[in-house]
Image: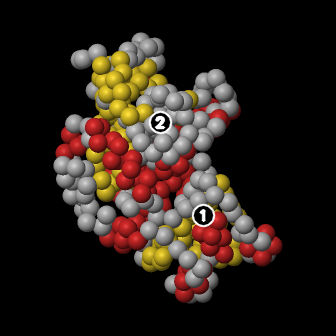
Amino acid sequence: MTQKMTGAILPGNSTTELHQFEIPEPGPGEVLIKMKASTICGSDIRAIYHEHKGKGPEGYQPGMVAGHEPCGQIVKVGSGMRRFKEGDRVVVYHISGCGMCDDCRRGYMISCSSEKYRKAYGWQRNGGMAEYCIADEKDLCTLPDELSYVDGAQVACGFGTVYEGLEKIGISGNDAVLITGLGPVGLAAAMLCKALGANNIIGTDVSEERMQIAIDKGLCDHVFKAGPDNVQQVLDVTGGKGVERAVDCSGSNHARLAAIQATRKWGKIVFIGEGGTCEFEPSRDIIHDQKTIYGSWVTNIWRMEELIERIVRWGIHPEDLVTHRFSLDQVDDAYSLMASGKCGKVAVCFDEELERKSSGENLHADGQCCSSC
């Protein structure tokens, strides 16, 4: 093994930089992972790529290797390992917590209260946009052979985040579901709602490209351009009653209001999309119709392992929502495309994952693919 590796950092000016780093040695309870896939999250674009505007748990430390959706194979282990070994295929839960606070003991390292020990991969510690990554054993989930590394990278944040929100409101074959925002998180919500049995899935978005992906992949029964008529459009396809469940993945004030107002009496709404605002009339929109709004941020590590098991059982592949794959030396193009919003999920891939093609995905030498994009 050479002693140097290439990794990408985000200066905060809508560019990326490739730097050389020493390949780290795993310490006690740590593993060295050979990266196979690292997907790009919308929060990377919102809070790091364009500018470093996050604070606290969203505060990117300049010079850190980017990428908080890593998946790969363990090539070296430190001392004191309890479960994982060299050769294991793993997904990295993307926040490493203290392990001692109330939230960590519940499995929610995302909400770790320790300012000293809480560190997110790709934010406060080096992440997956490099050839190798050091991870704590306690942050790992097993990736079954039935799933690709890109499947695993999708679970590491996006699909795990969506699954948590859907579990909070409960999704079944009894439910019509509205999803506002059909970016990678919204598309993941549609795929999981369908797997959970929802049979009237409605999506809205401002992007023609992402609406088309939802149609082409058969994820939604109805897709509408985001706008002032969305509530009436939802009522029209639900017998005038609205949906039992709504999932906001947009971060938009207008879309969130539509999600609330298009939900029928006694319905449940979950907000997953970050940023933005929300304005509504409590009595009219929530109280009198007995509706409930949930907030949901990422997931816990045991539920992530549960999701991986169920994805295999359901026979679905999160990688099917990846429309573009890039090599590490094309990382600037990868982030630029993701920032444009004219795509599904974007992945930086290594080794065999760079050669694989998701369903409906056509990979070209420049990383461009997918006729809908």
Where does the image place residue 30, in percent across and percent down from the top left?
Answer: 43, 20
Where does the image place residue 175, in percent across and percent down from the top left?
Answer: 54, 72
Which disc is residue 317 wearing? none
Say left or right for 300 vs 149: right
- Nearest to N terminus: mark 2 or mark 1: 2
Q: The disc labelled 2 sits on which kind of residue?
A: Pro
Mark 1 residue element: loop
Front tag of 2 and 1: 2
Q: How many marks?
A: 2
Residue 71 seen in render: yes
Cβ atoms under marks 2 and 1 closer than 8 Å: no
The residue depicted at 23 percent of the width and 43 percent of the height is: 354
Q: CA distance from mark 2 to mark 1?
A: 27 Å
The residue depicted at 45 percent of the width and 76 percent of the height is: 223
Q: Residues within 10 Å of mark 2 (few under 14, many from 20)?
A: some
Q: Which residue is mark 1?
A: 252
Q: How is the image coloured?
A: secondary structure
User: Quick one: which residue is furthest to the right in this view?
Assistant: 283
Say left or right for 203 vs 260: left
Where does the image place residue 284, in percent across and percent down from the top left?
Answer: 78, 76
Quadrant the C terminus occupies: bottom left
Reply above or below: 97 against 26: below
Residue 347 seen in render: no
Q: Which residue is mark 2?
A: 11
Say left or right for 50 vs 371: right
Q: Nearer the viewer, residue 318 or 365?
A: 365
Reply above or below: 112 against 202: above
**Residue 257 occupies which quadrant of the picture?**
bottom right
**Residue 110 occupies which quadrant of the picture?**
top right
The residue depicted at 45 percent of the width and 45 percent of the height is: 14
Q: Nearer the viewer, residue 280 or 55?
A: 55
